[in-house]
Image: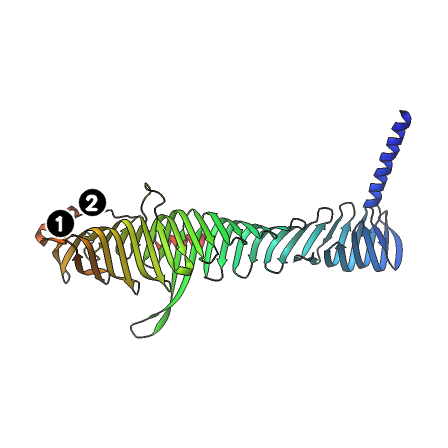
Amino acid sequence: MKISYVVLILLSAASLLLSQENKLITVIGDSLVGKMVNGESTREVFGNVRIMQGDVIINCDKAIHYISRNEAELIGNVIARKDTLTIKTPHGFYYGNLSKTRSNAGVYLDDKKVILTADSGEYYFDEDRAFFESKVKLYDTTTTLTSNELTYFQKQNRAVATGDVFIMDSDNQIIADSLEHFRNSKITFAFSNVRLLNLKNNSEIYGEHLEDYRERGYSLIDVNPLFIQVDTSYVTNEDSTKEIKLDTLFIRSRIMEAFRDSSQRFFAIDSVEILKDEFASKNDLTAFYRDEDKIIMKKVSETAKQPVLWHETSQLTGDSITIYLDKNKLKQLDVDGTSFMLSQNKNYQERFDQTSSAQIKIFFKDNKISSAQFYGNVYSIYFMYDRETKNGLTKSNSAETVVYFENNEVTEVKLYNNPASEYYPEKQVNGNEKSYLLPRFVVFQNKPVKEEMYKLLNELR
């Protein structure tokens, strides 16, 4: 038993010595000068210097080998290699006990998958992990990433970046305070002050948390998202001169999803607010098909609130509202399912033209309503005017109604299929406007406004 115990101790000691020897670095070169510096034994090695530790090989012009510390200072044309990894710097250090190299003189890393550069950095060979600082740049064949700091896990093909992070490919750019990027799966997570830019359609999404799945063409923003798309157009003034007009589409919600497939779909979910020029909406679900220039707003359930849409002095509600755009201008608007439209007179704000029906189709010219078609049990109230003078109202019902507008005011109403109409003189109407309301009449006061959207945008920027 004693012999066995002694043998075990000897084997353990031998194993420890072998492990320590494997940790010791070897430094060779054309010439060597031994010195004592502050009581420490050093060796200065010159010319074709080669430092070795396991499968790590470092070449440089000069090295100062600190023997007891198992470290070396690397000077001039430093190149460190391990398998497919190459690190270059003009000046650095190698720490044998940690299997780590470090440089503050500018670092270049190439592992045949990515190229990584920075003002300073360190690499842990045992962990295949790099930590780079200051003016960090990582790029491969499809992606470029810059940041203040970055940790690169070579075997995992994973990068964690912090501080002024910017990542881009051919179609998109992501800006954030911090970011985690998986190169193989092309999945990116971004955190805090996030900004996603789509270069194809000039749109941006702001938020505090983003998940981007490039292979699927899918992005999710689920903390304080705000979508904007700027449209530049030219308007002709009365003197025939033209000037640039910037019209921005704002969409705000609790969750946003973007699908970069053939349909270029975009979804805003829960507490949605939309604003574009004189058009605004509040709803629970918005789908924006950018390639089709179509926006759809829907109820999310039978018991949910209807989407509300405002256009200048008009307000619409329905189970679903579809907007058709032409070169980012309103072309047509369809309202389906228990539809209601009201328009407030700009001179007499207590008077609202009202129509309820099963379906509405509204047509626009130069972003103003030109006509509206109502289908299915149409009931309406329209106030009459003799030029600018109040002149009573008409109540009517029919299977179909067509209303014509000029400057967003009713100019003509046509009834089709079993029409019925009643006229109420002005003396009966004046002061009693609230008595002439259809059953589902509601004026919603929470219309999104530009000031709030721009304030939010400035806070996010």
Within the image, what quadrant is residue 143 found in?
A: bottom right
In the displayed structure image, the side of residue 72 where residue 438 appears, left or right: left
In the displayed structure image, the side of residue 333 where residue 97 appears, left or right: right
Q: CA distance from mark 1 to mark 2?
A: 19 Å
- Residue located beneath label 1 in the image: 431
Q: Residue furthest bottom?
A: 240
Q: Is residue 450 visible?
A: no
- Residue located beneath label 2 in the image: 439
Q: Residue furthest front?
A: 417
Closer to us: 429 or 453: 429
* Percent coordinates x, y for residue 339 in the rendering: 26, 50
Q: Earlier in the sequence, mark 1 or mark 2?
A: 1
Identify the residue at image location x=71%, y=51%.
123
* Percent coordinates x, y for residue 244 in the rendering: 38, 68
Asked whether disc 1 touches disc 2, contact meaning CB atoms under 8 Å apart, the reply is no
Closer to us: 316 or 195: 316
**Measured along the vertical axis of the image, is residue 414 above or below residue 305?**
below
* Percent coordinates x, y for residue 278 in the rendering: 32, 58
* Percent coordinates x, y for residue 340 in the rendering: 25, 50
Q: Secondary structure at mark 2?
A: loop
Identify the residue at image location x=65%, y=53%.
133
In the displayed structure image, the side of residue 179 where residue 26 appears, left or right: right
* Number of marks: 2
Q: Is residue 140 visible?
A: yes
Kindly identify the amino acid type of the residue bearing the numbered disc 2.
Pro
Kindly identify the amino acid type of the residue bearing the numbered disc 1.
Gly
